[in-house]
Image: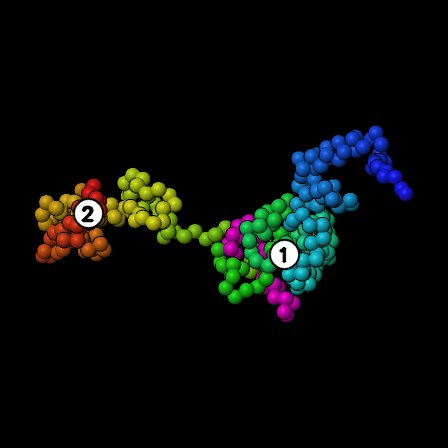
């Protein structure tokens, strides 16, 4: 007959058990406060750099970005394009997608960044490469109606000194959309004159910048309101309104808002629509 025996669990750490528990809790607390992954002991917020080569602000935190198949599909056509220009091309150099070097004193360095679409992030990457390269190219997947076909994007690239390539992986070609050369846009003198005239003739600052869901108080509208207000007193001629509206003649003839009626040649009065607009919309003055 076996007598009842109580077995007590003995911790192999002995007197150091409490110390081990304390150290474990402290290490977990330190890991959570410093954003360190408890399994890998790596801080995801710290930027890891290769042991031998210095990374020039790489596209993301991935160590091996060559595994991203969509962007790598653009590599071969862009490489062939640069090689035809006499560059020795290599991929993934110090965080840059493509680096081409043409021998010389000093050597010519070209950096190309690849993205499937033309985004702000790609443009900012190009800005970061400008100080390390003689030329910077941005290469994107060619589309029919995408951002790569937007002429404003082409002008932006030229203003920043970037080249822009549209890549066709199917046939292995790269289409030049903008070249990395000094660029100054051709002045738009008519638009400049309109801006200066509107700014000079508009009275006060009546519309807040960024407004999109309310009528903009343009100089033309201000003069039309001035004409309507004066015509409340009775029919008048355009020359009688010159003091309050320098463009009274064209405004009365065109009658864009339908506020005026011609009583006889050279004489106008306020229409019913004009009276309603002044009263109901509170546009007097």
- Find residue 171 and report its horizontal and vertical position in percent: 64, 70
What label sits on residue 280 in the rendered view? 2
Secondary structure at numbered mark 2: helix
* Left-right relation of 256 to 170: left
Quarter of the picture holding the N terminus = top right
The span picked out in magenta is 153-176
* Left-right relation of 231 to 131: left
Residue 165 in which image quadrant: bottom right
For label 2, count other residues whose C-alpha is less than 10 Å away and answer few (under 14), some (14-19) or many (20+). few
- Find residue 221 and report its horizontal and vertical position in percent: 25, 48
User: Circle 1 sits on which residue?
Assistant: 114
What's the residue at 19%, 43% (across, down)?
A: 284
Secondary structure at numbered mark 1: strand
- Name the image colouring: rainbow
- Find residue 121 and report its horizontal and vertical position in percent: 57, 50
Residue with the most extreme bottom position: 171
What's the residue at 39%, 45% (across, down)?
A: 210
Q: How far apart are marks 1 and 2 (CA)?
A: 57 Å
What's the residue at 23%, 55% (across, down)?
A: 256
């Amino acid at each position: 007959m076996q007598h009842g025996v109580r077995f007590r669990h003995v911790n192999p750490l002995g007197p150091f058990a409490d110390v081990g528990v304390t150290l474990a809790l402290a290490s977990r607390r330190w890991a959570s406060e410093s954003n360190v992954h408890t399994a890998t002991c790596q801080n995801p917020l710290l930027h890891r750099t290769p042991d031998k080569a210095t990374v020039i602000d790489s596209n993301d935190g991935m160590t091996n970005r060559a595994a991203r198949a969509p962007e790598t599909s653009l590599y071969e056509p862009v490489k062939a394009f640069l090689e035809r220009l006499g560059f020795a091309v290599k991929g993934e150099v110090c965080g840059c997608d493509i680096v081409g070097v043409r021998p010389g004193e000093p050597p010519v360095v070209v950096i190309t960044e690849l993205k499937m679409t033309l985004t702000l992030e790609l443009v900012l990457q190009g800005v970061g490469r400008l100080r390390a390269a003689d030329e910077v190219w941005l290469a994107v997947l060619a589309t029919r109606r995408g951002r790569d076909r937007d002429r404003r994007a082409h002008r932006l690239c030229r203003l920043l000194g970037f080249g822009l390539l549209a890549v066709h992986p199917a046939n292995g070609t790269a289409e030049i959309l903008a070249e990395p050369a000094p660029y100054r846009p051709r002045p738009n003198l008519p638009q400049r004159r309109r801006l200066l005239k509107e700014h000079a003739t508009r009275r006060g600052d009546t519309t807040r910048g960024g407004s999109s869901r309310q009528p903009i108080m343009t100089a033309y509208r201000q003069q039309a309101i001035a004409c309507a207000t004066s015509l409340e007193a009775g029919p008048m001629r355009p020359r009688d309104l010159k003091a309050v509206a320098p463009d009274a003649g064209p405004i009365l003839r065109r009658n864009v808002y339908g506020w005026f009626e011609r009583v006889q040649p050279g004489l106008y009065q306020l229409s019913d629509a004009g009276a309603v607009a002044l009263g109901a919309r509170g546009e007097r003055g």
